Image (cartoon, helix red, strand yellow):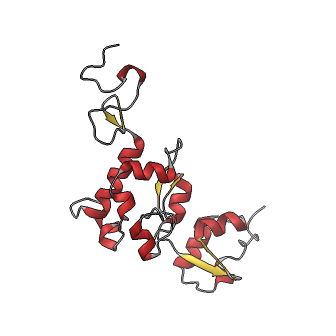
């Protein structure tokens, strides 16, 4: 087997040894490496197009995750198909919950692999508290069996009382 210039066990599709992190396959970055590198860029590079949503909002990365893609892998493993890097709490930092910085700042684990539906719900969306339960519009729509656009329309029309916003739709006009 000739692996010269191709990296360690190239024919077997294993990581390319020419890269320090070892997270490449056939000279292409793995999904976990790309997720990690994009996370670092969003939080630390002021010229990144998404800086305003991350670093610009004060979202930081703990030393444990920032220092190495291998640490991210050790915390949450490989990304399952269809899932991408997600902060469990959208208003907290990317944190492993294990490193010295996390321990000193009382930061718990705040990273996971999540599907697009979960990530969409994690964004800064309108939260509604009703009967002691706080959920986003999409979550309320799913729980109550009404359309999200119905809830959004009521809010856009100026309704503020959760019992009015989340009331079942008027069925007078349906068959």
Q: Which residue is at the far bottom? A: 161
173 w.r.t. 114: above or below: below
69 w.r.t. 47: above or below: above
Horizontal side of residue 118 vs 167, given as left or right? left
Q: Residue at x 32, y 51 (%)?
A: 37
Horizontal side of residue 5 vs 143, given as left or right? left
Task: Determine the image quadrant of residue 101.
Answer: bottom left
Q: Residue at x 42, y 76 (%)?
A: 105
Q: Residue at x 34, y 58 (%)?
A: 66
Task: Determine the image quadrant of residue 26.
Answer: top left
Question: Relative to the observer, which residue lies in front, 135 or 74?
Answer: 74
Question: Where does the image place residue 138, in percent across and percent down from the top left?
Answer: 60, 65
Q: Which residue is at the far front? A: 100
Question: Where does the image place residue 164, in percent across and percent down from the top left?
Answer: 67, 82
The reply to whether residue 48 is visible in this rendering is: yes
Q: How many marks?
A: 0
Question: Relative to the observer, which residue lies in front, 99 or 114?
Answer: 99
Q: Which residue is at the far right? A: 175
Question: Where does the image place residue 87, in percent across and percent down from the top left?
Answer: 47, 62
101 w.r.t. 130: above or below: above
The reply to whether residue 93 is visible in this rendering is: no
């Amino acid at each position: 087997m000739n692996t010269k210039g191709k990296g360690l066990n190239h024919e077997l599709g294993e990581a390319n040894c020419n890269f320090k992190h070892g997270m490449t396959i056939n000279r292409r970055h793995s999904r976990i490496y790309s997720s990690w590198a994009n996370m670092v860029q969003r939080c630390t590079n002021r010229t990144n197009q998404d800086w305003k949503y991350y670093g610009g909002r004060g979202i930081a990365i703990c030393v444990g995750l920032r220092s190495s893609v291998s640490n991210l892998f050790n915390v949450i493993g490989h990304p399952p198909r269809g899932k991408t890097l997600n902060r469990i709490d959208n208003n907290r930092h990317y944190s492993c919950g294990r490193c010295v910085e996390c321990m000193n700042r009382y930061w718990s684990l705040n990273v996971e692999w999540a599907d697009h539906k979960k990530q969409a719900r994690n964004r800064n969306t309108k939260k509604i508290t009703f009967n002691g339960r706080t959920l986003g519009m999409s979550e309320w729509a799913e729980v109550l069996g009404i359309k999200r656009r119905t809830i959004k329309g009521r809010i856009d029309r100026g309704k503020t009382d959760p019992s009015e916003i989340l009331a079942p739709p008027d069925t007078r006009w349906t068959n």
